[in-house]
Structures are given as C-alpha cells and as structure tokens.
Image: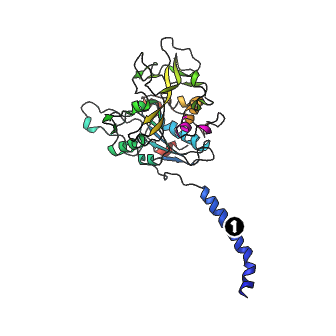
Amino acid sequence: MNAMKMKPLTPYFSTLLLLSLITLKAAGEVRPHPVPESPKWLTYRGEAGPGKGKHIVLISADQEYRSEQSMPMMARILAKHHGFDCTVLFGVNDQGLVDPTMPVYPKKGQEGAFKHHSIPGLEHLEKADLAIFFLRLLTLPTEQQTHIVNYLDSGKPIIGLRTANHGFRGALPYKIDGKQVRFGDLLGGTFMGHHGNWHRDSTRGDLVEAMKGHPILTGVHDIWGPSDVYRTFKEGASLPEGCTALVYGQPLIGRKQNGASNPDKEALPVAWFKHWQTSGGQSARVFQSTMGSAKDLENPGLRRLIINAAYWGMGLEKQITAGRSVDYIGEYKPLPSGFNYEQLGVVPQRPNAYHK
C-alpha cells in the first residue's frame, strides 16, 4: 500500500532533484568577488575570459596624471573583456574623498599641520593575484605601508605606472639583509627627472626590435602619449642589471601624435620587465611603464601593453592574444594632467563618482 502511494510521486521527486542540481551548479558558477562592496573603493566582477578566478587590485593615489580616472577605466576593461575580478583603491583625504589636490610636502613652518595620505582597503592586497600601483610621493600611516610591503615581499607580480617609481616621500619599512629597499629600485629605476620637456613634449613608443616576440608586446603598436619621457638612470648609463627594455620613448616636439622627433633628446626606455627577489627567495615578476597618464591611456597600444603585462605577471602569457579587446567600457574622457586644479576642474569626490 505504501509502495503504491509512493509510485506516483517518483516523477515529482525526480524533477525536484534535477532542478536542485541545476540550481546548485548555477550557484557554484557565481563566484563572490574577493572584496566586499564598500563606498570606500570600487569593485568589478570579472565576466567571461582568461582571467576568470584571478583578482587584480589597482591603486590610484597621484596628484598630477589623473589616475583616479584611468584606473577605474582599466579595471572595467580587465573585468569585462578579460574576466579578471578587479578592485580599485584610492588615495583619500580625511573626509574619505578621493583627493588629488592633497599636498605631498608640508608648507614651511607648518610641518605639524601636514596631513598624511590614506588608501583605505590596502588589506585586500592579501587577496590579490596582481597589484597595479599608480602612486606619487605619498606619506602613509605605518599600518598601510605594512600592507604594501607585505605584498611586495610576497612574490606576487607587480606593475608600476608613471609616477610609481617615486611613489613614496619617505622610505617604506622594507629591508632585505639589512639593506633598505626603495620602491623605485624594486621597479627598475627611480625617477631622476624629466628627460622630455615637461608638459610640452609628447612621447612615441618604439618597440625594441629584438623583443617583438615577447608576449607583452603581442598586438602592441602605435604607442603614443602626451606625457614626456622620464629619466631613470644617469646620462651615459643604462637600465639596471636584470631589467629588459621592451619600449623606448622618443621625445617628440609638441603634443601631437606623429609629430617630429626632438633632435636634442635621445630615446630612453619607457617600459621594461624584471624579476624581484623577495626576502624569502621568491621571484616576483615586475613590469614598469613610465608612460601611463590618463591621457596617455587613451592610446590603445599602451592599454594593450599594460594589459598584456598583467597576463604575463600572473603567468598567463599563453592566454595573450592580439585580438582580445582593449576598448573602453562606456565613456572615457580624462582631464588633462597638471596641478592647476581649479582650471582643470579637479575636485575631491567620492569613489563612486568614478564608477562609470
């Protein structure tokens, strides 16, 4: 009798079981973002692409080159077209506003009133598979510096853009065998001055012929940007041992693509890679581009170079293709570089103002 009662219900339970399995499978495919949503930072969930399951933290904290606009733009591209989960952290003032106008040096006689910078969310570097640093002359609290040092010494890959090679005003609490580690040296060269004419020249990026087969240069061409070339080593010297140049920057007269080369300015390396040996003997992949202002990144060749470097840094170089898109997601109209904030329209804003 009980068996006869159960028999008509079997198809019903079979259907329920099937639906449950489908639901569980679907739920398993929806991965939570590694970083919780917060008004203090931006998160972008990776879609389909080779980067699925990898997390990139992009840090914007400069005062000149509008990284507060460019890093969210790059995060959107990396998430939408390439599948990476991305988190953008910002340098903020004491009201929690993204504030590129904060001074980097105390005014004479007012040292006690100088306000330190702050980057909320640096603890999430622990969950990163790659960190992209766009910093300039920061003075951070010790706790935040420690989060950065822990990442730098983790063996995970590092990308530095433009002013990152002079990202901190003082030394980080990072020593190996008793020797102070400077972030610029870790990247392969600290800023030593403007080689091109500051805010007057532009830069054409010429690929190193012998390196054109390197994965980072896959599909890269026609690099140009309106920022000038940095010098990172003394005249007559070269990149430090262990650095391999990928792109040389030729200063151009004026700020138009395809302009004439400045005959008084030789080309210098503007993009290279190296490996960093941590205190524990791990080898971290490092890429540095001294190009990278928000206006530079209107150039698709430069965007592809940096995105390829992200793949390479995480050991995904076999996944790099020349055809995967580096197009914007939505509108991207960055403000020009500079410190004349009122004229340029640069004002402190909430992080979600850049969530476009």
The location of residue 150, given as percent across then percent down, is: 39, 44
Extreme-front residue of the structure: 281
Extreme-bottom residue of the structure: 1
In screen coordinates, is 264 left or right of 180? Answer: right
The location of residue 339, given as percent across then percent down, is: 42, 29
The location of residue 284, given as percent across then percent down, is: 46, 38
- Which of these two is toward me, 315 or 27? 315
Q: Secondary structure at mark 1?
A: helix
Q: Tell me the residue that label 1 is attached to.
A: 18
What residue range appears in magenta? 309-325
Q: Residue at x 56, y 49 (%)?
A: 53
- Which of these two is toward me, 138 or 351? 138
The answer to whether residue 341 of the structure is visible from this angle is no
The answer to whether residue 283 of the structure is visible from this angle is yes
Residue type (three-letter) at the residue carrying disc 1 = Leu
225 up-or-down from 170: above or below: above
